[in-house]
């Protein structure tokens, strides 16, 4: 994996997670499909998105299978103009990690890129959210599946639809229908920016 010298290094996967997937790492047998949303509005936004994708691919038991186009959006939940705009993308992964361990890895990636959790809708270098994990549903407050606000967010639905035109959000319906309902105002395609699928 190529990173510039300024890129942060993601900490090793905790031993407890590694132990779960050592055998599966070589074969990735019986993987589950997961949808992850990436976004950031601080620092080098594109490099941060690509670094997060590469870090996910480096995770034992995770393989990145698809990467969406890049979109630029206004921050969610704050006054217009109070923060820089976001770059957003969606990735599809196949994984042998259970949802809790995938969430642990997502948080490790955020921490490696110096994500600061102070304000709920605060600016951030990178955000890695699990949108859906197979067809699982869960009300666990530590990880609600699918993501409870995904159906309302065009910056999730639009890039997801690009990589999976027939995608369905569990319990909510086809992503195309959800996107039609919320509209795409403020979600701007950045055709001049591109994210790489890891080798």
Image (cartoon, rainbow, N blue to C red):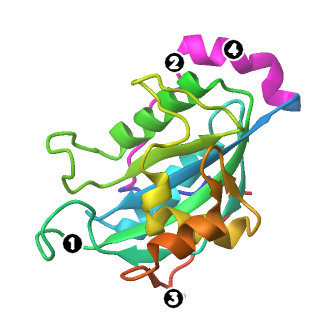
Residue occupied by mark 1: 84
* Helix, strand or loop at mark 3: loop
> In terms of secondary structure, where does tag 2 sit?
loop
Q: Earlier in the sequence, mark 2 or mark 4?
A: 2
Q: Which residue is mark 3?
A: 192
Q: Residue at x 62, y 44 (%)?
A: 171
* Residue drawn at the location 40% of the way across and 56% of the way down: 5
Magenta stretch, residue numbers? 7-26
N-terminal-most mark, 3 or 2: 2
Q: Is residue 6 above or below residue 178?
A: above
Q: Which residue is mark 4?
A: 20
Compared to 71, does 7 lie above or below?
above
Q: Nearer the viewer, mark 2 or mark 1?
A: 1
- Evaluate if marks 1 and 3 touch, with contact meaning CB atoms under 8 Å apart: no
Please give the residue where the numbered disc 2 appears in the rendered image: 14
N-terminal-most mark, 3 or 4: 4
């Amino acid at each position: 994996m190529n990173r510039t010298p300024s890129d942060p290094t993601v900490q090793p996967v905790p031993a407890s997670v590694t132990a779960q997937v050592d055998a599966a790492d070589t074969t990735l047998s019986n993987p589950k499909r997961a949808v992850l949303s990436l976004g950031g509005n601080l620092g080098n936004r594109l490099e941060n998105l690509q670094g997060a994708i590469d870090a996910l691919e480096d995770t034992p038991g995770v393989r990145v299978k698809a990467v969406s186009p890049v979109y630029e959006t206004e921050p969610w939940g704050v006054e217009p103009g109070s923060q820089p705009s976001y770059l957003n993308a969606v990735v599809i992964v196949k994984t042998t990690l259970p949802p809790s361990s995938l969430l642990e890895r997502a948080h490790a990636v955020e921490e490696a890129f110096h994500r600061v959790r102070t304000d709920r809708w605060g600016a951030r270098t990178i955000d890695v959210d699990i949108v859906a994990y197979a067809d699982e549903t869960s009300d666990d407050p530590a990880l609600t599946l699918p993501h409870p606000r995904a159906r309302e967010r065009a910056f999730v639905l639009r890039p997801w639809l690009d990589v999976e035109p027939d995608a369905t959000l569990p319990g909510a319906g086809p992503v195309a229908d959800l996107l039609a309902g919320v509209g795409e105002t403020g979600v701007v395609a950045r055709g001049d920016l591109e994210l790489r699928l890891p080798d």
